[in-house]
Image: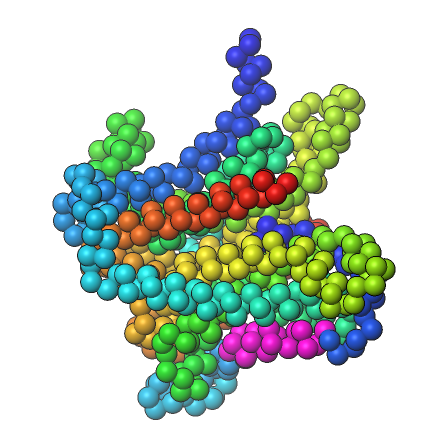
Amino acid sequence: MKLGRWLSDHWVMGAGVLVLAYLFLPIAVVVGLSFNEPSSRLSYDFNEFTLDNWTNPCGPGDMCDAVVRSVQIGFLATVVATALGTLMAFALVRHRFRGRGATNLLIFLPMATPEVVMGSSLLALFVAGGVPLGFWTVVIAHVMFCVSFVVVTVKARLSGLDGRLEEAAMDLYASELQTFRKVTLPLVFPGIVAAALLAFSLSFDDFIITNFNSGTTVTFPMYVWGAAQRGIPPQVNVIGTAMFLIALLLVLSTSVRRRRAA
Amino acid sequence: MSVLAHLPAETPAQQTRRGHSRLLPYLLLLPGGLWLTVFFAVPAVQLAATSLYDPSGSLQEGYAMTWEFGNYADALSAYWPHFVRSLVYAGIATLLCLLLGYPLAYAIAQKATRFKNLMLVCVIAPFFTSFLVRTLAWKTILSDNGFVVGLLRDVGILGSDGRLLATSVAVVLGLTYNFLPFMVLPLYASLDRLDGRLLEAANDLYASPVRAFAKVTLPLSMPGVVAGTLLTFIPAAGDYINAELLGTPNQYMIGNVIDSAFLVRLDYPQAAALSFILMAIILAMVFVYVRRAGTDEVL
């Protein structure tokens, strides 16, 4: 009786936790495999515990180069996409102008288009224009698909702002520029940071569009893809685990700081 | 992404407050708009043109524009099974995401009082490790010597030499896994705004929990359901990583075909035609679906 009552109260939570476990299972496997000594190059099964992968993360030749290149591309693409997207979000939320519908469509379509289509059409453009494929074409492509996500994220933050705060600043004789710097920007900043983090993770993790536009440049996802055909070095899981830990630390530190500030 | 469904309309006051400079909005839009036009819209138009080139040309010799609408018929007749497979896999994966994602989103929004942020971090945590590395981890989980296959064989769901890897089940499972967060986040956003007093009111009026869910919770969360299914279905239909890593050529989706048409076979006109058919199918389905679901809030 009591059990039945408890179950009916908590089954949703139980189901939710089970689904979370499904989401976490592969991550646990990645962490586990980072300590694995595979029996052969093409084996994906657990074999033997070892710390070798962690003490020698850059063992497989060009993997670390690929990671560094992915970070560089991610950084450049994030800076440009965040700047462009934030400006667009301000225009869309704070201004009335002709062509708003067309602009919204131009921002929405890249999010609704399958990556294969975007990647392939950009490739056709570069090929037709005789642009050599490589590092910079990847950056261009990443900025392109990140901008829309930045716009949407910053826009959400911006339209949730209490406009009266800015009116108050103006009433207190702050100039428009001062109001922007002292009131608007600090309030929107968390949205911009969230957008930048999103852009970086989209860029760092992108495979499909990169695969079309990279020429001979190898990013980390492309390295993993290539390695999956030849036999995957266990160090790939070390990088996966390390990325997970770094991102987790980032998220936790910002939430702790926010709690302290509150 | 989650916010896609919930952008509040700007109030006229907000818009006019700074509306005095007519040029400013265009200046703000110019760099981003130009980037999207040059690197998204123009290529899309050019892709449309490419799809009508004479297929007998080649990259080296160049293609002649002959308005070859036959490219579309050829592409469809050669690869319609891949289109069907992509839509079926993506459809099943989206349905599974909805079935798995709804309880999770509901639990986070309505039940997880203290652990809300922790659970939200857990939902986006998979994004922190690489998409490809996580998909490869499924190879380990579903491996023939693995725990899951062993259990299913013992229970008798799988035959003694039955396997999961390199089957449609593995591909759909991978798609479901990879796009689940895209379902959970918009669902969470709409369920989080659900006013608990409405459910109390339903309860006071003698609605059973099931009826209250069907008549109150579900209709109010429809914008989240619509946004979530779109954000799951669109990338899943175009995906080819799961089919490549967890399946065999028998599970190849249309993305695999487009990828090899562009990068291996170098048949640009056909590849472009295939891309356009995929985009047209998806846009048509999105349009009908949004109409049916009756929410224009999505965009």
Q: Is residue B131 above or below residue B193?
A: below
Q: Is residue A96 above or below residue B144?
A: below
Q: Is residue A159 above or below residue A261?
A: below
**Residue at the far top in the pictured view:** A1
A107 horizontally vs A119: left or right: right
The quadrant of the picture occupied by the N terminus of chain B is bottom right
Residue B222: image location, x then y, percent: 66, 44
Count of numbered circles in the view = 0
Q: Is residue B158 magenta?
A: no
- Examine the image and state in which quarter residue B141 appears: top left
Residue B203: image location, x then y, percent: 74, 23
Q: Is residue B28 magenta?
A: yes
Magenta-drawn segment:
B25-45
> Which SS does the magenta portion mostly show?
helix
- Front one among B252 and B232: B232
Residue lying at 56% horizontally and 61% vertically, measured from the top left: A149
B144 horizontally vs A13: left or right: left
- Examine the image and state in which quarter residue B24 appears: bottom right
